[in-house]
Image (cartoon, helix red, strand yellow):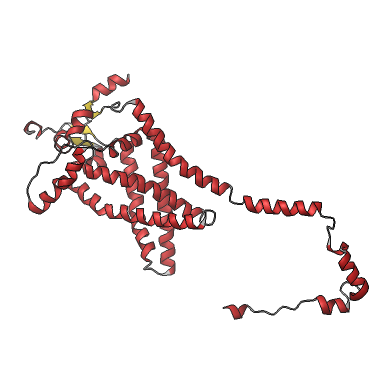
Amino acid sequence: MHHNQHDIRPIQKHPLNVRVFHYILLLSFLPLAVTGLLLFFKPLSQSGMQLTYDIHIIAGVVMGLDALAFTLMAFDRVVLFIARVFSLSERDVKWFMVLGGYPQKFLLGKKVPVPPMNKYNSGQKLFGVCVLIGGTLLILSGLVIWLAPHVAPRDLVWILGQIHLVSGLILTAFLPVHLFLAVYRFDDFKAMMVHGNVPYHDAAEYTPLWVEQEIVPVTANQQRNK
Amino acid sequence: MNNKKHVFAEDSFFISRRKFMAIGSAFIAVIAIPVGWFGNKIIKRNDYIKARSAGLYKDDTIAKLRVSHANPAVEKYYKEFGGQPLGHMSHELLHTNFVDRTKLNS
């Protein structure tokens, strides 16, 4: 892979609509996670808890609308995301055996062979499945226990509350891992936060299958769309 | 790299149309089933109350006696015992006194 080392030709990884969706998700989920934990542990006064609740509701509505708008406006991206995160192969088992080589790199300072990955590595795919299913459960259960708690059957509302709690805690637990690895993979961080592109050498190192199977020169796409 | 336009992108048709439709419709179904389920629950939430009030109105319409002062038992009571409505005897027997007990509960 030496010839790829300094290849900085940009590959589009995150299109604009994905970046906008991710930004709104970021701005709504961070307050949701904080206020969700506050609502669970109830450390504040009556008025403080009321404010926490109001912020949780507003941020929740923003996140729900964000998800709804993205599903309607970028349905193809949603389908591609589902296809990617639910794909499972032997490579994923091998990836999890070495955890992507990250612990060895951080703790022992040595490099171990990692199976070639597609656009998302196995850990990102697991996270993607949790975000997709957990996020949907959070939005739907949140809507019911916020708007219709006395309409739905009592036991169902209780179950939805537990589902809301467990999904929220799982996704909140993913949050520090996601933030750390996002900043660690700085080329990908810039792609999601700024311009959407990763340099060729980064993509070839971390996502060789993606580059090999799905990446084409931009002119090819333009010609096909004509 | 910020100013440069990307020269590579994902092949926009790397997923087959059949697979796209299968995943898309499965996703829509998984979302639509709970939404339809809860929506239905919410729309039908007052149905049993409406059915009960409809039943009560129906009972009233087919009842032979539709007002209490036409009840023969009440007529007989006033005739033979209670005197007239709101009279002294009726007041003593039928009037109820209430005591404020709200403080006892708290």
Q: Name the residue: 19% across, 38% down.
A: A91
Q: Name the residue: 52% across, 55% down.
A: A153
Q: Is residue A215 left or right of residue A103?
A: right
Where residue B103 appears, as percent x and y from the top left, is 60, 80
Q: Looking at the picture, tell me which residue is in the foreground, A129 or A16.
A: A129
In which image quadrant can residue A17 be found?
top left
Q: Name the residue: 72% across, 52% down.
A: B55
Above-or-below relation of A62 to A198: below
Above-or-below relation of A8 to A184: above
Q: Is residue A186 left or right of residue B82?
A: left
Q: Looking at the picture, tell me which residue is in the foreground, A35 or A173.
A: A173
- Number of marks present in the image shown: 0
Q: Spot the residue most to the right.
A: B79
Above-or-below relation of B1 to A97: above
Q: Is residue A85 left or right of residue B72?
A: left
Where residue A123 appears, as percent x and y from the top left, is 23, 45
Specify the quadrant that holds the C terminus of chain A: top left
Above-or-below relation of B66 to A72: below
Where residue A84 appears, as percent x and y from the top left, is 28, 36
In which image quadrant can residue A211 be found?
top left
